[in-house]
Amino acid sequence: MYFGFLISDQYKVSVMKKLESQNNLIYFDNAATTFPKPETVIEAVVECMRMYGANPGRSGHWLSVKASDIVFKTRLALANLFGVSNPMHVVFESNATSALNLAIKGLLSGKGHVMTTSIEHNSTIRPLHRFEKDGVIILDILEGDSRGVVSVSEFKKAKKNNSKLVVINHMSNVTGVVQPIREIGKWCRENNIISIVDCSQSAGVIDIDLKKDFIDIVAFTGHKGLYGPMGIGGLVLSDSFDYRMIKPLKEGGTGSLSDEINHPCFLPDIFESGTLNVPGIAGLLKGIEYVTEFREEIETKKRELSRYFIAKALKKVEGIKIYSGMDSLGVISFTIKGLSPSHITNILSENYNIMSRQGLHCSPLSHRKIGTFPEGTVRFSFGVFNTTKEIDIAIKCLNKLVKEKSKNGV
C-alpha cells in the first residue's frame, strides 16, 4: 500500500528547508549509497541524457553508436578493475541484488549443497533460503569467528560430496569486516566448487582480481564504492568461467539476432534483455575512473576516519559500544546504552542534520551474530568526502544525546 499521500505539508516544507541548507549537512550513510558524487559522474549522466541518449545496439545512427561506445568503454573499465581480459564477461544489471539473483538462481537449477556465511546481505540469504525451502538445495550458513570471518578450514568441514556453490560477502555492510576471499576462492577452485563474491561494499575500496583471487563471479553495484549513479550494477565473470552454466532469468529483445525466435546464447546478450541504463553506465564509467585514480588514497582515508571515530567515541561517549574493528574501512556500527538506534538517528537527522542509518541494514544474520538483533545498531559509514571535523561534530551531538537521556532519566 502506498502511504506517500500521508506526508504532511509541514514535513515537506521541513525537508525543502534542509535541502536548501546542505552546506551544513553531514552525510554518514555511504554504505547505503555514496553521496555526494564526483562532479565528473554528474556531468557524464547529464551529458548522456542531453547529447546522446539513444538506445545502444538497436539502431545504426550515430547517436546509438555513441551510446554503444560508452557501454563498451564501461565494460572494458570494469574488466580492467576486476582483472578480467574479456570485457564481454561484464554483464549489466540494475543493481547487485538483481545480479546476485541472476547468478544464484541461474546456477541452482538442480539439487546440490551450497555454503554461505553469517554476515550475508538479504540479497544473498533470501534467494538461497527460497531454494532451501523449496527443497532445491541443502544450505549451510557458516558462523565463522566472533566477527563472522570464515576460514578455509570451516569450509572444509562443511563440504559435502555434492557441494556446488559458495556465496560470500566480501565486506560486511554492518561491521565492515572483510572475508579472506583469495584463500576461500583458491580452495573452491581446487574442489571444483563455483564461487560468487558479493563486492557491493568492497568494490572501489579493496583490490579485487578474479584471476589472482581464484573467484568465478563477482556481483557489484555502481552507486556505492564505485561512486556511480543508482540503478546500475551487474556481474563480472572470470575468463575461465563457463557462462553457459547460468540459466538466464529473462529473455527478450537484445538488438541482436532479431530474426531468430530463440534467445541469443552468447555474452553479454544472453543475460541482457531489454534497454540498458545508459545514463547510469556513463556515470559509472566516470566513477570507475575516479576511484581508479585515487583508490589507495580512498582506502587510507576510510581506514583513518574509522580509527579516528572509534578512538574518540570510546573516550568521549558514555555507554557507547562499537561492533566494528580498528581495521574497518569506513563502516562503523554502534549502540549507546539506554538509547534506541532509531531514536539516535532520528535526533541526529532532525536536530543536527547528520545522516546515518539505524536498524538491521538488510542483514539480520549479521545482527544475530553480533548480538544486536532485533533492534540493530546505528551505522556511520564514511566516504571519501567526509572529514575528521565532521566526526568531531557528530561525537559532540552524541554526547548531547547521552546528557539529555541522563537529564530526563530515560
Image (cartoon, rainbow, N blue to C red):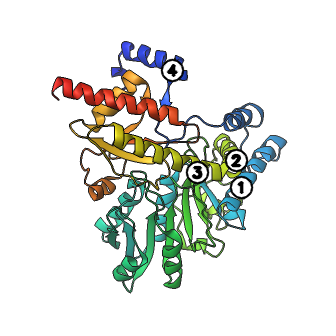
Which numbered disc, 2 or 4, marks the residue that appears first in the sequence? 4
- Label 2: which residue? 285
Q: Nearer the viewer, residue 268 or 310?
A: 310
Residue drawn at (65%, 37%), measured in percent from left and top?
38
Mark-to-mark CA distance, 2 and 3: 23 Å
Q: Is residue 246 visible?
A: yes
Q: Tell me the SS state at disc 1.
A: helix
The circle on residue 77 is 1
Q: Is residue 105 visible?
A: no
Mark-to-mark CA distance, 3 and 1: 23 Å
Which numbered disc, 2 or 1, marks the residue that appears first in the sequence? 1
Q: Tell me the SS state at disc 4.
A: helix
Identify which amino acid the numbered label 4 is placed on.
Leu
Residue 273 is situated, as x and y percent measured from the top left of the image, at 60, 54
Mark-to-mark CA distance, 4 and 3: 30 Å
Mark-to-mark CA distance, 2 and 4: 28 Å
Cβ–Cβ under 8 Å for marks 2 and 1: yes
Identify which amino acid the numbered label 1 is placed on.
Ala
When the figure is inspected, residue 179 is found, relative to residue 367, above or below; the finding is below
Residue 33 is situated, as x and y percent measured from the top left of the image, at 51, 41
Q: Which label sits in the foreground, 4 or 3?
A: 3
Q: Which label sits in the foreground, 2 or 3?
A: 3
Residue 243 is situated, as x and y percent measured from the top left of the image, at 60, 71
Mark-to-mark CA distance, 2 and 1: 7 Å
Q: Nearer the viewer, residue 174 or 141?
A: 174
Q: Which label sits in the foreground, 3 or 1?
A: 3
Which numbered disc, 4 or 3, marks the residue that appears first in the sequence? 4
- Label 4: which residue? 19
